[in-house]
Image (cartoon, rainbow, N blue to C red):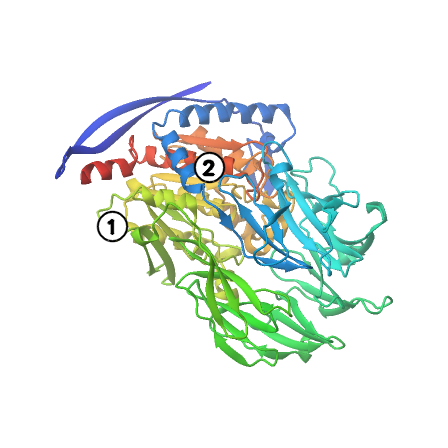
Amino acid sequence: MKKVFFVLSIILTVMACKNQTKEETTKTTIALNYPETKTVDTVDTYFETKVKDPYRWLEDDRSKETENWVTAQNETTFGYLEKIPFREDLKKRLSDLWNYEKVGSPFKEGDYTYFYKNNGLQNQYVIYRFKNEGDQAEVFLDPNTFSKDGTTSLGQVSFSKNGKLVAYSISEGGSDWRKVIIKNAETKEVIEDTIIDVKFSGLSWKNNEGFYYSSYDKPEGSELSAKTDQHKVYYHKLGTSQKEDALIFGGTPEEKHRYVGATVTKDGRYLTISASVSTSGNKLFIKDLKNPNSKLVTILGTTDSDTYVIENTGSTLYLVTNLNAPNQKVVTVDASNPTPENWKDFISETENVLSTSTGGGYFFARYMVDAVSKVLQYDYSGKLIREVALPGIGSANGFGAKKEEKELYYSFTNYKTPTSIYKYNIAEGTSELYRKPKIDFNSENYESKQVFYTSKDGTKVPMIITYKKGIELNGKNPTILYGYGGFNISLTPIFSIANAVWMEQGGVYAVPNLRGGGEYGKKWHVAGTKMQKQNVFDDFIAAAEYLIQNKYTSSDYLAIRGGSNGGLLVGATMTQRPDLMKVALPAVGVLDMLRYHTFTSGAGWAYDYGTSEESKEMFEYIKGYSPVHNVKEGVQYPATMVTTGDHDDRVVPAHSFKFAAELQAKQSGNNPTLIRIETNAGHGAGTPVSKTIEQYADIFGFTLYNMGYEVLPEKIINEIKG
């Protein structure tokens, strides 16, 4: 055992009298016993450069040795966390604030209106339904009954065209591998054998006869980490067994793609198939289901754009695309000649990024204007009807309904406002509040401010900073800087119960819209990919420097946090600028950039990252920022708690295992470097509420304790105020 003793100097501001404070310095000694992590002589050669991989053995998620290492690391981590004096206080406050009724937007299927609801602390949301407005809602599907510990979660739910049948997927232990269950929606009785081994799949019904789904052949070796490379579309006809399911696409070398999805148009006439080799760009095919002998027709035969069919009226197709339109537009084309030279603009591209939905015989164009929602309503001739008046500045989502509906529902939220549901009269364009949550959090006490700061190369980057009104800009506010910066994903304002608890403690929560995301369209995304990936880290570093320069916080009170690609962001930032922050919180991160593409579906991320094998230049660039390969001896890294799940089969936990091992071996300072490994958990989706609360109590507890607090900041503030 390697024994390390950490001495934390804790400076506490405590009450002396109503108008006076004094500083007392106390010292708390915590003994940390890091488990011994053996090294092996594994060496890989990339373009004549030898790279050691001493912790390669931790990639074997099925070995007893790895299992023992996980157990030992958790014993060390939880032994440390249990000594944080306010850990239970945080857990209680998180539980108390979490405990309010949460209701999703209603949607209609067949004779029923359905909605998701969580009574407060239920591990999973329950689906309810009613026939007529005012009827007592009944439970339709309760995922909390799927497993005793709440770790089996509900995935996609898809109804047949007449609403009388339903297929839904479930995930066990957070895995991306799913099972599909088919029920009679009227009686709620299971009517088919369970479909198994489904992954990265939609469920799209062909009228009431059956449905399409996607999966891979089960890999040899570990299903949690072995590479999955050839996605296939199947059709399941009701009344037949899974082994009889027809292979529709993906069964030949010519049709080999990593991600393939099938969707039936709302009128049941066409089947569309999207095929991608990476997370960006897709080929698109269409088949006329009215003609059983029809062939797949190519709409797009290259992966140069992201394009999909959103609607059709007869043979007229409406497509959303970013082909020659980085911010997206909607085009129309006849299904008989659907290739791009025949496209006509329907909703033209603008300077703001577009996403589109349909409902009640209209199109709803949702734009991001500096990451904030703006919604326009169009009719089917392309005429602008109105701008939808939203309740405020924030994120509006939904605006979808069947063509015959007169009303639809949408949600509205921002960083300080819990999600409320609004009912929208489609013809009149008026909104009314449908459901507002009753939560023990007063949004009026908080404010959000959007700023634009300058990154290293002069690029202006937006950031929204949210905090309790009246905080003093003295550089001493505990601050979490959260980022992602990849895969065309946009971070728009959304309320988080956990972040509300953080802000109650006087904490600042800051979210920059880094390059690599989708906030400003394809160009913004590409500017943070491959040989431009460093832009993302520079944007994040510049955001931290802005917060420090403007006295929101200082390096002693700054934590950086991100998950998945955001875990890479944190890992790269903390290894490049370990002086910049006090705490680093990389979650389920992509941290071994030389080998990420060898696990599960990782090769599909190459559009954003490139791979270490494609060229010497790319290898050297990736190695230059890969977190696992840039932990150096003799450097004092910030207090770090790596978090992952032992069943994560998207970003395999070996990334986190190897990074934590490197930090523990090379950390020169007194800051703890821990790894918290959630058991029977995956990449994050479907995590039970009980586990989520425990995770946030530990994350916030670790953060505040390593910023020097032994008493929660809120208690200190209240004592000072008297």
Q: Residues within 10 Å of mark 2 (few under 14, many from 20)?
A: many
Circle on res. 36? none
Q: Name the residue under label 2.
A: 693
Q: Is residue 147 above or below residue 535?
A: above
In this orientation, which residue lies closer to the viewer: 340 or 366?
366
In the picture, residue 282 is in which quadrant?
bottom right
Residue lying at 80% horizontally and 57% vertically, measured from the top left:
209
Q: Is residue 81 left or right of residue 423?
A: left
In this orientation, which residue lies closer to the viewer: 538 or 560?
560
Give the percent coordinates (x, y) of residue 194.
Answer: 76, 42
- Disc nearest the viewer among 1 and 2: 2
Q: Is residue 70 left or right of residue 247?
A: left
Give the percent coordinates (x, y) of residue 590.
Answer: 53, 44
Residue lying at 34% horizontally and 60% vertically, measured from the top left:
450
Give the percent coordinates (x, y) of residue 440.
Answer: 37, 45
On the rendered image, what quadrant is the C terminus found in?
top left
Residue lying at 27% horizontally and 36% vertically, measured from the top left:
715
In the picture, residue 645 is in which quadrant?
top right
Q: In this view, does 239 lie above or below 718?
A: below
In this orientation, which residue lies closer to the viewer: 485 or 245?
245
Give the percent coordinates (x, y) of residue 399.
Answer: 55, 65
Q: In this view, does 208 lie to the left or right of 108?
A: right
Circle on res. 551? 1
Q: Which three-letter amino acid code belongs to the residue tagged 1?
A: Lys
Q: Can residue 202 be seen in this view?
A: no
In the picture, residue 383 is in which quadrant?
bottom right
Q: Residues within 10 Å of mark 1 (few under 14, many from 20)?
A: some
Q: Which three-letter amino acid code belongs to the residue tagged 2?
A: Ile
Instruction: Report helix, strand or loop for mark 2.
Output: helix
Quote the CA–CA distance across marks 1 and 2.
30 Å
